[in-house]
Image (spheres, helix red, strand yellow):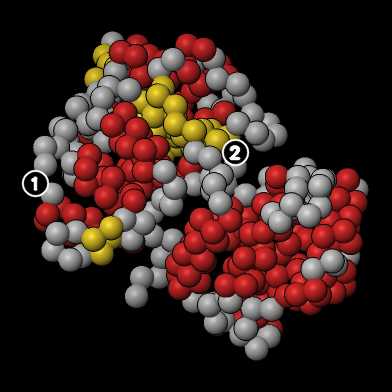
Amino acid sequence: MSQVLRQHAEQQFAEELDALQKVDDRPRPANWKLSPWAVLQYLMGGTLSNGFEVSPKYIGSPRLMEIAVSTLATDRALLLYGVPGTAKSWVSEHLAAAVSGDSTMLIQGTAGTSEEQLRYGWNYAQLLAHGPSEKALVPSPLVNAMRLGKIARIEELTRIPADVQDTLITVLSEKTLPIPELSSEVQAVQGFSVIATANNRDKGVNELSSALKRRFNTVVLPVPASQDAEVQIVTKRVAEQSRALQLPAEPPALQEVRRVVQIFRELRNGQTEDGKTVRVKSPSSTLSTAEAISVINSGMALAGHFGDGVLRAGDVASGLLGAVIKDPVQDTVVWKEYLETVVKERSEWKDLYRACREQL
């Protein structure tokens, strides 16, 4: 059993990738490990011709994944765009794993990301001793991906300062990165592409310039269309993560997962799923699918370590409180109002109402 807390996608799903390679007889773009058809099969899941079951990585519209995969088969970069928690990073990692067999060419965008982290830096001991040279150059994951013909991933592109973002323009349009200090350049090998992710509704984001936007094909990943689809996603991811974390709790009852998802959807959409309450105030928090998964996981940890191993309303309540209340003044008012006008009125939710009131 691996001691690694979180394996890369190509390690965790190595068996599925191998099975797809064996049955994949379709044309592959240069340096791709799988054909576009097989990459789509890997993402969407299904049964192969030899009876092997591939688990779905993305639960949603197959057309969006077809557009994403076909974009990577051209010379265009791919931008996965949407609200926080819509599986942008998850899809990005699995696309890179399926196409290149390597999802580790990663640059994490932050407010402090510099041009050197996107392009290249220098080993200053070598630089002082021998001057600018290939040996003194410290290539970024982007440069390594260009040289090897692999996929480079840039997470949270809109968190990177705008003047640093534009460093990518030459790479995306010319497929080359000049190194003036060495009077040379790095030219991208076939198979190279960039997958970037960006949030469209979050604090501390920097708008992309028009010039940079034009160099991406943008795929907007929506929130799950229905409650059933979101419940399916949460249930699947909770099962995978609880196995990895070895949580000593039983799998959560579908009722508890459905309640958490329903609360998130109602607060997010500003109205109840049954339509009985006309208007529900929305908190400042995002209340994404990813946060719903986190709430269930933390509840399972509580139940497993400090309870009887069965996820109950009391275990979920504290996670709900932390997810909903990000602004201690405004969001507390919204949460209390929701408890009194919606949760309290549902007879089958009395246990959850009491547990949530005790936490306030």
Q: Which picture quadrant has residue 317?
A: bottom right
Q: Nearer the viewer, residue 183 or 160?
A: 160
The answer to whether one can see residue 307 in this image is yes
In this picture, residue 192 sits left or right of residue 6: left
In this picture, residue 174 sits left or right of residue 277: left
For the N terminus, the image quarter is: bottom left
Q: Residue at x 30, y 13 (%)?
A: 174
Helix, strand or loop status at disc 1: loop
The answer to whether one can see residue 245 in this image is no
Amino acid type assigned to the residue bearing label 1 in the image: Asp
Tell me if mark 1 has few (under 14), some (14-19) or many (20+) residues whose alpha carbon lies within 10 angstroms of its own. Answer: few
Q: Residue at x 84, y 56 (%)?
A: 338
Q: Earlier in the sequence, mark 1 or mark 2?
A: 1
Instruction: Please tell me the numbered disc located at residue 25.
Output: 1
Q: Residue at x 69, y 78 (%)?
A: 312
Q: Nearer the viewer, residue 297 or 62?
A: 62
Helix, strand or loop status at disc 2: loop
Q: Residue at x 80, y 73 (%)?
A: 347
Question: Circles 1 and 2: CB distance less than 8 Å?
Answer: no
- Find residue 280 and report its horizontal and vertical position in percent: 81, 48
- Find residue 46 and report its horizontal and vertical position in percent: 28, 58
Residue furthest to the left: 25
| Mark 1 and mark 2: Cα distance apart in space | 37 Å
In this picture, residue 189 sits left or right of residue 59: left
For the C terminus, the image quarter is: bottom right
Q: Which picture quadrant has residue 219?
A: top left
Determine whether 310 is above or below 217 in the image: below
Determine whether 83 is above or below 306 in the image: above
Instruction: Please tell me the numbered disc located at residue 83.
Output: 2
Amino acid type assigned to the residue bearing label 2 in the image: Val
- Find residue 271 and report its horizontal and vertical position in percent: 75, 48
- Find residue 232 and report its horizontal and vertical position in percent: 50, 61
